[in-house]
Amino acid sequence: MIRTVAIVPARGGSKGIVGKNLVRVAGIPLVVRSVLHAQAARTIDLTVVSTDDPRIAAVAARAGARVIERPASLSGDTASTESAIAHALEVLAGEDIRPETIVLLQCTSPFRTAGQIDGAVEHFHATGADGVFSAVPFHGFVWTRAPEGGVRPATYDPARRPRRQEIDGVYLETGSFYVFSRAGFERSGSRMSGRLEPFEVPPEDAVEIDTPEDLAYARHLAARRREPGMLFGVDPRLLVLDVDGTLTDAAMFYGETGEELKRFHTRDGAGIARFRASGGKVALLTGERSNAARLRGEKLRVDDIVLGSRDKAADIQAIQKRLGVSPEHTVAMGDDVLDLPMAPHAAAFVAPADAHPDVLAAADLVTTARGGHGAVRELVDLLLGPGWKPARR
């Protein structure tokens, strides 16, 4: 029985950041981050994405969400979030799905945890409140415009100026999530009505993305948090890496005698060494018959090298058979359309930031680094970050 539904509103239009709900933080589109958070929460029975954009719909569906196509009348700049909620509930009711509790997740808040969602839902039921919203305690000296002119204090008495820590009971709404009943919403038409309760979240999670500066800050924080993103459920034991455009920047240099030269990044090499030292295996799979790629692979002591591949689907399966690693424990990385056949034979397919558009669209994760500029190292650091460390095998 579906009792609690998470609704993720995700319009295609955005003025501050073009295609905002598809921009990536730690390699993951914002809409997908919200879907993943909902799917990981034990209190959520169904995750719904309401959108007017076919690109968002495709990405959300691939992440496992139930997509509801929003009509054009609810897709403009003036369309409210409440109108999207009402439409989603109407569509679900037509399928005989009438949840008791709604959890609204906003894509522009990239940082939250499944535990916070579960905690907020439990707080909602335990307190008997009409609504719960994510918030952080606020200890600032706030002033508002006065009707008679000038301003007046909103959070303190200037005649008895307190210390900041003494300003208590004031909360800043983060916009990350809201919990409310379907019956209450249908009665009031608002996600926030009646008696409301804040659910406190850490200040470092209270980030909303509305401007390019907000996005840059969120990406900076995500890099420090070392989030594994969509790879959180993968137990990778084998990395299969394309060479040109992945381990290199795709440029080719030829010496006067015709020898081929390629530029490799030492950090990528260090990443490969780190993955192997942790017990994982690494293979290079390239369509070029490149002596430079062979020499680089041999220096890094990778476990398998395939040069001149004309069928990467067959070759990745052959590598897996030789190394004794199944597809569900394989992560593949490539930058061009010839690498796409690897994707169905891996638990996750990863692309560097400057990959071909078709590859970016198909990737489970996109690194922030470009090919040949540390993209492989970034991937390895994500894999070996919190949440997964391979045992020695």
Image (cartoon, rainbow, N blue to C red):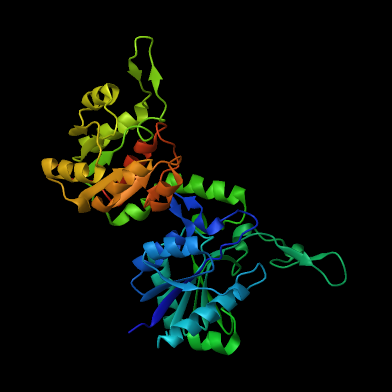
Vertically, is 216 above or below 184?
above
Vertically, is 333 above or below 202?
above
Nearest to the observer: residue 19 or residue 382: 19
Single out the residue that lies furthest toward the top.
Answer: 257
Residue at image x 43%, y 43%? 356
Q: Is residue 227 visible?
A: no
The N terminus appears in which quarter of the rendering?
A: bottom left
Residue at image x 22%, y 36%? 283
Nearest to the observer: residue 160 or residue 49: 49
Residue 170 appears left or right of 181? right
Which x, y percent locates residue 162?
67, 61
Nearest to the observer: residue 171 or residue 38: 38
Residue at image x 34%, y 19%? 260
Nearest to the observer: residue 201 or residue 301: 301
Which x, y percent locates residue 24?
48, 51
Which x, y percent locates residue 13?
60, 61
Vertically, is 311 above or below 164?
above
Single out the residue that lies furthest toward the front.
Answer: 310
The C terminus appears in which quarter of the rendering?
A: top left
Residue 123 appears left or right of 73? left
Which x, y percent locates residue 82?
58, 77
Vertically, is 155 above or below 354?
below
What is the count of numbered marks? 0
Q: Is residue 313 visible?
A: yes
Residue at image x 29%, y 22%? 292
Residue 323: image quadrant is top left
